[in-house]
Image: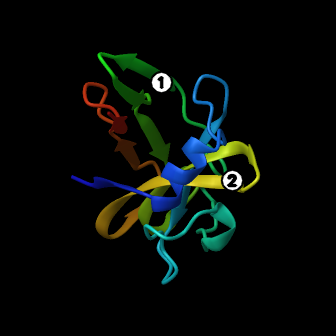
Amino acid sequence: MAVFNKVNDFVEQLGKGVHDFSADTLRIALTNAANAPTAANSIRGNLTEIAYTNVSEGANPTLAGVTWSESAGTAKLTVSDKVITASGGSVAGFRYVVIYNDTSTSPADALIGWYDYGSDLVLADTETLTIDFDGTNGVLTLS
């Protein structure tokens, strides 16, 4: 199971009001490059993404069911699971699924975090990958 890793700059950008999870559009980027996400990367433009050829959802699929809730001083970001489907051929190998804020402009496409699958995943035609964003515990919590 892939584990979520927070981008360090996300914390700063959250404090500066860059992220509004009740209104912003969150998307994913797929990458396997040497400049893969790290805690220090801060924007999508720093990533080398795969060619999204044969990804039925197209480039940078949008995440649905995004909620930011708070209870007893702990906030939680939850996102509906996302299914990536290969259609018309194989999808290029990727290791990292990166969550970013497509609405943010300064910085543009601010990264939130990423999931590391440990090795490249290649989806053959008609294969799917379900990205489980953990509906119970959320993508991340802040307390």
Question: Quick check: 96 left or right of 135?
Answer: right
- Local SS, label 1: strand
Q: Which residue is mark 1?
A: 68
Image height of 105 relative to 49, above or below: above
Q: Position of residue 65 (x, y in %)?
A: 50, 23
Question: Quick check: 52 left or right of 69?
Answer: right
Amino acid residing under circle 1: Trp
Q: Position of residue 57 (x, y in %)?
A: 61, 43
Q: CA distance from mark 2 to mark 1?
A: 19 Å
Residue 56 makes an appearance in the image: no
Amino acid residing under circle 2: Asp
Task: Give the residue drawn at x 76%, y 53%.
Answer: 106
Task: Give the residue drawn at x 55%, y 35%.
Answer: 63
Foreground: 135 or 23? 23
Task: Give the residue drawn at x 57%, y 29%.
Answer: 21
Q: Which residue is mark 2?
A: 109
